[in-house]
Amino acid sequence: MKRVLVIDDQPEIRELIRMTLEIENIEVHEAGDGSEGLASALRLRPDLVLLDVMMPGTLDGFAVCQRLRGDATLRRTPVIMLTSKTEAADRRRGLESGASAFLTKPFSPRQLLSVVDRLA
C-alpha cells in the first residue's frame, strides 16, 4: 500500500485529497503546516508528499521541499507542490526547491490521481 503525506493548512483541501486517495487504497497522513509536515515526513518516510506552497508559520512549501531534499532518506521521495500560484517564477522556484510536479488549485480528483499514480 502506498503511503502519502498531505501537508496543507486548509482542512477542506486535506479532506478532499484524503477521500480521493483512500478510494484508491492509498494510506493518507495529514499535516497542517510546514513544521508539522516536515516532522511527519521524517517519521513516516512516505512514498510521496503532496505539499502546499503557501502556509502559515516559519516553513512554507518551498522551505519544506528543500529540507526534504536535504535529508538522505527522503531526497528521492517525489514531492507534488499544490499551489494557486501560476507564475513562471513560482514554478521555477518550486523546481529549484526540488519539486517533482505541480498541481494548480483548484484541481480535480482525476488530475490528482493521475499525478500520484505516475510518481508514487
Image: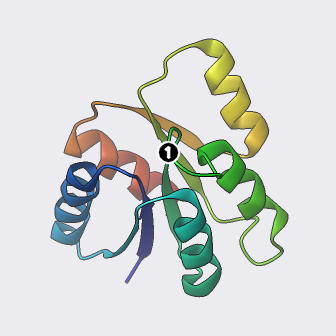
Q: Is residue 59 left or right of residue 109?
A: right
Kindly identify which residue carries mark 1.
55
Assign the N terminus to one quadrant of the image. Answer: bottom left
Q: Position of residue 99 (x, y in %)?
A: 65, 44
Residue 57 point in image, percent of width and height? 57, 51
Q: Nearer the viewer, residue 49 or 11?
A: 11
Q: Nearer the viewer, residue 43 or 4?
A: 43
Q: How many marks?
A: 1
Looking at the rendered structure, the secondary structure element under dot 1 is loop
Q: Residues within 10 Å of mark 1 (few under 14, many from 20)?
A: some
Three-letter amino acid code of the residue under disc 1: Met
Instruction: Please name the residue shown 23% across and 43% down the image.
Output: 110
Q: Using the image as rendered, state which of residue 43 and residue 59 is in the foreground.
A: 59
Where in the figure is residue 32, as x and y percent of width and height? 41, 61
Measuring 34% from the left and 31% from the top, which residue is drawn there? 105
Image quadrant where residue 92 sits? top right
Q: Quadrant of residue 27?
A: bottom left
Image location of residue 20, percent across then percent down: 19, 58
Residue shown at the point (59%, 46%) measured from the top left: 61
Task: Kindly identify the residue that appears in the image at 53 percent across and 70 percent down.
Answer: 36
Q: Is residue 98 above or below residue 106?
A: below
Work out which residue is located at the far front of the displayed protein and give it. 57
